[in-house]
Structure formats: structure tokens, C-alpha cells
Image: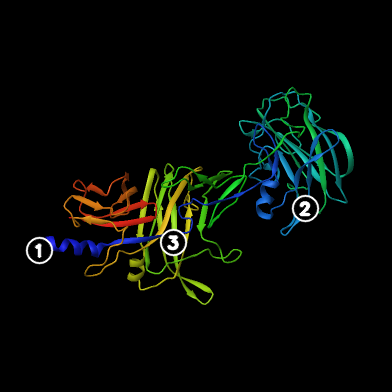
């Protein structure tokens, strides 16, 4: 009697069909070409890093001055207003006002330096002005004399001038130990003023050097420029485009295929900001990004690896009913992901939970984060995501149906230990095994074989999911271990 029930038990468990969340395998990326930037031995940054991603414009560029290349900085109009220009031999500060500290900078140590020499021309009409700033640091902290706080010299620039050498005189030697200097130029007072920025203000600079110093400003003559490495953005994903502190990247450390999405928590002046991404395309500017729940689909799964010490990443699902043109949230689910050095898998039967809570949904949103907002305290926590899919629930039916050529048959099922899979016409691929908690417990490849045998003897009783990947798609079989 028990033997005759085995085929029926298999058909009751069946196989599930999968639908890849559009680009849920993160194999499709869009390459965005970036702008030219001065070549440097250390990090340098300009206003282009900010406005190019938001407005597709640049206001710092390479120009000719009759003796070679120079740099032009100019206030330009955009749909978001007039954007002032800046260039820093270093990085942007996290603070504001006179307490600012510029990260990075060039290596320097000569205590005899007395000022900054620059060839420049500019046009600051009316009351408009720009500035030059220099900051000396030791172990990342400002040191020595300054006219705007410790180690910091600030010089306003105004009026009009054709090409001429300008010396920004410190009126003293630094005469203290330091290991870095940051030099910056801007076409507006970005530090001490909140007034609107006038359009068309500009300056051109060349031959930046340190006065009375043996230290040299690398590429201070702006002769060497190169295009920044193109930015790769994932298709069907909303990510924060930040060239200064990149919060995501295309990773080759994938669970399957070539690529995965990697989110990276960033440290902003002591405050850790988790990186976020949402699946799908927003219906309008600032609108909700949702995906359709395919008919009959009630399972959601994904693979992840979380490289952190004691942080928690997050995947948040929200389910919606449509009410005209509006989406009404009816249910939510949050997965908190602990650190792991290997890929793990999560399977979630949202259909069952929605039924248990007497709600229905036609759309869902998926938001992922490399940390818990407001609680994360680990910079550089890295969350890798791959293989986001939705699938049908395992069909329950009576009798027999005609098996498709890519149907996978598991015998015996239920089993006391060993189970064999008849792969039919699927002769090569890979498979993953998951326990009832949705955690992956094994990964194997197969080739040139019709039958695969797996031993569950040493594993606890329960339901195990076998997910098979092959050229034409994905199949899943659930096996009961008695």
C-alpha cells in the first residue's frame, strides 16, 4: 500500500516554475561613460562628481591657455539651479563652517612652505567671489598656523583678471610637522555664504605649486587628464549614484552566473550610512518602485552573502493592492541577514502568509540595505545579492499528468534517506539543496548524467528543496525526509 502511494506523493509535491525577477540575476548592467578628470597619484575631486550624476552636466573642464592645458571652473545653470564649481587636491569635508577637515590630500612635509603660487585668470562680476583654501594636516588633523582655524588658510578671490601669477601668501612659514596638504579652488563662497550663486562666474587655473618648498604638487600644471572609469548600473534597479562615496558595484563574486549586486555601507564623517537599492522602476519622480506578482506565484527567494562583523543587513518586502492608480500596502515582511562568508539562500512563501492574514496582493516592492538604518555602526559592510526569483507554489492535485520533457522525478519521495532524481532530458547544470528554513546546505554540478542520487540520511526529518539550474531555466523539487 505504501509503495503505491509514492507516485501520488511525488505528484502532490510536484515541481515549481520560476520567474526571474527582471534582472534578478544581476547579469544585465548599463554602462554610463563619465567625464575627463586630472590624473593624480592621490584622490582628487571636483563638482563634476556631484552634478554629472544628477544633471548630466559638468562645470570643471580642460582648456588650453597657450602654453598647454589648464583647468576651467564655471558656475553653470541646470534644472536644479546654478551649480558652482570646485576642485580639490583631496576630498570633500564632512563638516561645514570653520571646523571643516578635508580628508585625503597630497603627501608633503616641508615646514618652510610660505604660500601657494597659481597662474590664473578669472571673472567675478559685482559682489561675487570665489576662493582658494589650503589645509595642513598630521595624521588626518589640521596642524600649524592658519587664518581660518588651525592649519587652514582661506583666501577670497574677486574682480576680474587676465592670465597672471598669483601668490597666496601665508605671511609665515608653517614651521610645524605635517604629512599632508589639501588645496582647493571654488567659484563661489561654499563655506561662509548661503546666498544664491550667480551664473557665468568662472576662473581658470594652472601651474599650482608650493612657495619655498621642495614638495611638488602632482599634475599641478593640469597637463594630464583621463576619462574616469565608466559607471556600471544594474538594469531594473534603483541605486544611489554617488561617485564620491560609491555605495554599490558590479561584483564578480556571484552565486550563479557572472555578476552579483554588491551594496557597501559608507562612513560619512563618523556616521555610517547603509547602502540601499530597490527593485523595479519608479512610476514617477520619487514614486514607488513596484513589480507585478505573476499569476499563481506565491514564493520569493534570493541568494546573499553578507561580509560584516556584527552588523545586520535587511531585505524588506511590501505587498500592495491596487486601488485605481494608487497602491495600498496590505502586508510587509522584513528579513534580517546575519554576516556570512558564503552564499546563503532564503525562500519565503508569501502566498501562504497573505492567505493566513486574509489579504491579497497584485504588486510588491523589494528594498535591500547593507545595514539597519540608524543602528548600523560598521563602515564597509558589504551585502552581495543574486538570483532573486518568484515562483509558483508546489501544485497539489490528484491523479497523473503527462510529464514534460524537462520534468524532474524524485524517487522515493518521501524517503528515509537516499533519493534519486530522473533528470529526463536535462543532462548538465547545477543544483542547490535547502532545508525547511530556506538555508542552503549544499551546492553541486552535474554533467552527462540522467540520474542524480542524494543522501539525506544524516539530516533531520523535514522537507528539503532541490533547485536545479540548467540551460533552459530552473526547476525545483521538494523531497520529504521521514
The location of residue 228, given as percent across then percent down, is 65, 41
Dot 3 or dot 1: first in sequence order is: 1
Dot 2 or dot 1: first in sequence order is: 1
Residue 257 shows in the view = yes
The residue at the far bottom in this view is 324
The residue at the far left in this view is 1
The location of residue 90, given as percent across then percent down, is 67, 37
What separation in Å lies between label 3 and label 1 (alpha carbons)?
A: 44 Å
What separation in Å lies between label 2 and label 1 (alpha carbons)?
A: 83 Å
Camera-side residue of 348 and 252: 252
Instruction: Indicate which disc residue 76 carries.
Output: 2
Dot 2 or dot 3: first in sequence order is: 2
Camera-side residue of 249 and 173: 249
> Are the residues tagged 3 and 1 within 8 Å (C-beta)?
no
Q: Secondary structure at mark 1?
A: loop
Camera-side residue of 444 and 209: 444
Instruction: Indicate which disc residue 118 carries.
Output: none
Give the mark toward the camera: 3 or 1.
1
Amino acid at each position: 500500500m505504501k509503495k503505491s502511494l509514492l507516485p501520488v506523493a511525488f505528484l502532490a509535491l510536484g515541481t515549481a516554475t520560476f520567474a526571474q525577477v527582471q534582472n534578478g540575476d544581476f547579469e544585465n548592467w548599463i554602462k554610463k561613460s563619465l567625464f575627463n578628470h586630472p590624473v593624480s597619484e592621490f584622490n582628487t575631486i571636483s563638482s563634476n562628481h556631484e552634478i554629472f550624476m544628477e544633471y548630466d552636466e559638468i562645470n570643471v573642464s580642460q582648456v588650453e591657455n597657450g602654453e598647454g592645458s589648464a583647468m576651467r571652473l564655471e558656475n553653470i545653470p541646470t534644472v536644479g539651479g546654478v551649480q558652482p564649481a570646485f576642485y580639490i587636491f583631496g576630498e570633500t569635508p564632512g563638516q561645514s563652517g570653520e571646523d571643516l577637515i578635508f580628508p585625503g590630500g597630497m603627501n608633503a612635509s616641508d615646514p618652510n612652505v610660505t604660500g601657494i603660487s597659481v597662474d590664473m585668470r578669472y571673472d567675478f562680476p559685482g559682489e561675487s567671489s570665489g576662493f582658494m583654501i589650503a589645509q595642513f594636516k598630521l595624521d588626518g588633523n589640521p596642524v600649524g598656523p592658519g587664518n581660518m582655524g588651525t592649519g587652514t588658510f582661506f583666501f577670497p578671490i574677486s574682480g576680474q583678471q587676465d592670465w597672471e601669477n598669483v601668490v597666496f601668501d601665508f605671511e609665515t612659514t608653517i614651521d610645524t610637522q605635517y604629512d599632508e596638504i589639501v588645496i582647493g579652488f571654488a567659484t563661489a563662497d561654499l563655506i561662509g555664504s548661503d546666498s544664491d550663486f550667480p551664473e557665468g562666474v568662472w576662473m581658470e587655473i594652472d601651474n599650482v605649486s608650493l612657495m619655498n618648498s621642495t614638495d611638488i604638487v602632482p599634475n599641478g600644471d593640469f597637463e594630464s587628464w583621463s576619462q574616469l572609469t565608466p559607471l556600471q548600473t544594474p538594469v531594473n534597479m534603483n541605486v544611489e549614484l554617488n561617485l564620491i562615496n560609491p555605495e554599490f558595484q558590479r561584483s564578480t563574486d556571484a552565486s550563479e552566473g557572472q555578476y552579483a549586486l554588491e551594496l557597501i555601507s559608507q562612513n560619512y564623517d563618523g556616521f555610517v550610512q547603509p547602502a540601499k537599492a530597490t527593485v523595479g522602476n519608479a512610476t514617477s519622480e520619487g514614486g514607488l518602485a513596484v513589480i507585478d506578482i505573476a499569476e499563481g506565484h506565491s514564493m520569493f527567494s534570493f541568494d546573499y552573502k553578507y561580509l560584516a562583523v556584527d552588523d545586520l543587513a535587511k531585505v524588506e518586502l511590501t505587498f500592495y493592492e491596487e486601488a485605481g492608480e494608487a497602491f495600498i500596502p496590505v502586508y510587509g515582511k522584513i528579513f534580517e541577514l546575519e554576516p556570512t562568508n558564503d552564499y546563503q539562500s532564503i525562500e519565503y512563501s508569501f502566498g501562504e502568509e497573505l492567505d493566513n492574514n486574509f489579504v491579497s496582493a497584485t504588486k510588491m516592492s523589494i528594498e535591500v540595505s547593507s545595514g539597519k538604518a540608524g543602528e548600523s555602526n560598521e563602515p564597509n559592510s558589504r551585502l552581495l545579492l543574486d538570483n532573486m526569483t518568484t515562483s509558483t507554489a508546489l501544485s497539489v492535485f490528484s491523479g497523473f499528468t503527462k510529464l514534460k520533457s524537462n520534468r524532474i522525478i524524485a524517487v522515493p519521495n518521501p524517503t528515509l534517506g537516499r533519493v534519486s532524481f530522473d533528470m529526463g532530458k536535462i543532462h548538465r547544470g547545477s543544483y542547490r539543496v535547502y532545508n525547511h528554513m530556506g538555508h542552503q546546505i549544499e551546492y553541486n554540478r552535474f554533467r552527462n548524467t540522467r540520474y542524480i542520487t542524494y543522501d539525506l540520511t544524516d539530516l533531520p526529518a523535514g522537507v528539503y528543496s532541490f533547485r536545479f539550474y540548467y540551460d533552459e531555466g530552473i526547476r525545483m523539487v521538494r523531497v520529504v525526509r521521514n
